[in-house]
Amino acid sequence: MEVVIANETHSVYAEIICKTIAESAQIRGTGIAKRTPEYIATKMANGNAVIALDGDKFAGFCYIEKWGHGKFVANSGLIVHPDYRGIGLAKKIKHKVFKHSITKFPDAKVFSITTGFAVMKMNTDLGYKPVPFSELTDDPTFWDGCQTCKNYDVLTRTERKMCLCTGMLFDPNKNKTAPKEVKENIFKRLKNIKQNLFLKKDKK
């Protein structure tokens, strides 16, 4: 298994990456900002992506996005092919793309929005901290990317202050202490509160 910084030669995997991301979101029943194969290929060509390969077979992927004129970066589209799940590959990809992000963009804050505990746990291990959306990028292009998410109406209803996702941030100027352990039951309770608060309104 090889986890490497992607380049233009890996663009042949762009279509299966997009398909795997979409199918995974559908199975989990979660919202996701859709990306095209052309968009993914551009990320690879710019050296802003990490890909995992088992020989010539696609195994996993994640990419970097810049926001707010480079003040923020996000590690997005983390996905592992179903054939390679349960072996710790997502963590390896996450660590690789995070290290690449802070090396390539040392002054940028790294952020994430997620509905999944596994991603939240990995983020916490890397030093991310839960934050309100107001501490994330205010770049409208980033938030416009959420329009394809089924929960977008929640985001707009709260004037982009909160959604079912949890915002997380790594600030290189503040993250000097060891990260605290994240408790799954606390995260699940927070997620349930958000779902009860926002989704019940949709049923009225």
Image: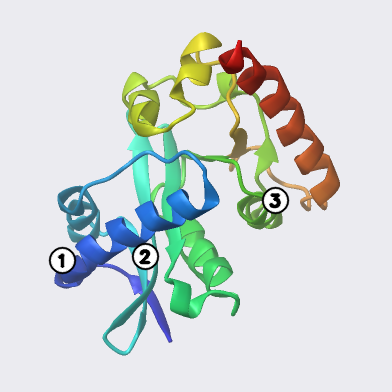
Residue type marked 3: Thr
- Kindly state the secondary structure of the residue where label 3 is placed: helix
Check residue 50 in the rendering and tell me which mark sits there, or answer none. 2
In the shown orientation, is residue 191 left or right of residue 155? right
User: Marks 3/2: CA distance?
Assistant: 20 Å
The residue singled out by tag 1 in the image is 8
Residue carrying label 3: 124
Please report the residue visible at 42 percent of the width from the left and 41 percent of the height from the top.
Answer: 32
What residue do we see at 64% from left, 24% from top? Answer: 132
Residue 81 appears in which quarter of the rendering? bottom left
Q: CA distance from mark 3 to mark 1?
A: 31 Å
Residue 17 visible in the displayed image: yes
Q: Nearer the viewer, residue 112 or 178?
A: 112
Residue type, mark 2 in image: Val
Q: Nearer the viewer, residue 111 or 157?
A: 157
Are circles 1 and 2 on residues that touch, CB within 8 Å? no
Taking the spot 47% from the left edge, 38% from the top edge, the residue there is 31
Residue 181 drawn at (x, y percent)? 82, 53
Q: Is residue 123 shown above or below 173?
A: below
Labels 1 and 2: the sequence-earlier one = 1
Pointer 1 local density, CA inside 10 Å: few below 14, some 14–19, many at least 20: few
Q: Quadrant of the N terminus?
A: bottom left
Q: Please give the label number shown on residue 105.
A: none
Q: The residue under label 1 is which amino acid type? A: Glu
Of the two numbered discs 3 and 1 on the same chain, state the one appearing first in sequence.
1
